[in-house]
Amino acid sequence: MLFFILLFILVAPLLEIAVFIDVGGTIGVFPTVLLTLLTASIGITLIRSQGFSTATNIRAQMEKNEFPFEGIFEGFMVLTAGIMLLIPGFVTDGVGLLLFIPWVRKLLYKMTASNHKEAMREDYSSSSLFEESHKHSQKTIDAEYKDTTKETKDE
């Protein structure tokens, strides 16, 4: 896995530069810069709209007492897509736009879903987390007291 990450870090910038040179040579420098700024603004707009939608889905899953695995994954994908659109480059823009398509995110979620999802859901459901956090809490007892140390010193 580390090998693929390092390979991506090395190859991605070279690929972006090659595509930039090709697109700039075809449509010109000024339209290339405008296109890059346009994709960045589209990214910001899509992060806002789909981010709110994802937050609503997470809230709905938590109200059902479910740990929002899919909602968190989708939120991460929306954030990743937005970052990809903000990074100057046409290859990252293409990947970012793909990640904004809901069925692509669902497909990626199904491909990466863990076998331990059910165990995690039982261990970390919102109700069990609530119960666990209150298991170790101390009980508060409401009482009134009178300071008798002053009375004994006066006598």
Image: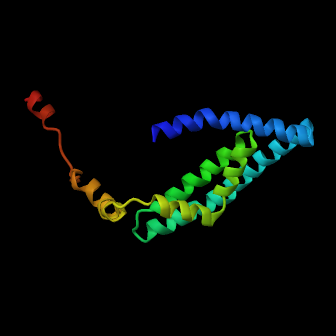
Residue 67: image x %, image y %? 41, 63
The N terminus - image quarter: top left
User: Which residue sits at x=59%, y=34%?
Assistant: 9
**Up-down relation of residue 46 to residue 89 (above or below):** below
**Up-down relation of residue 61 to residue 79 (above or below):** below
Of the pair 76 and 94, the residue shown nearer to us: 94
Q: How many marks?
A: 0
Of the pair 84 and 10, the residue shown nearer to us: 10
User: Which residue sits at x=32%, y=58%?
Assistant: 129
User: Which residue sits at x=77%, y=52%?
Assistant: 42
Residue 89: image x %, image y %? 74, 40
Residue 131: image x %, image y %? 27, 60
Of the pair 153 and 95, the residue shown nearer to us: 95
Residue 57: image x %, image y %? 54, 66
The answer to whether residue 149 is left or right of residue 16 is left
The answer to whether residue 144 is left or right of residue 56 is left
The answer to whether residue 145 is left or right of residue 75 is left
Q: Quadrant of residue 36?
A: top right
Of the pair 97 and 121, the residue shown nearer to us: 97
The C terminus - image quarter: top left
The answer to whether residue 113 is left or right of residue 120 is right
Q: Quadrant of residue 33?
A: top right
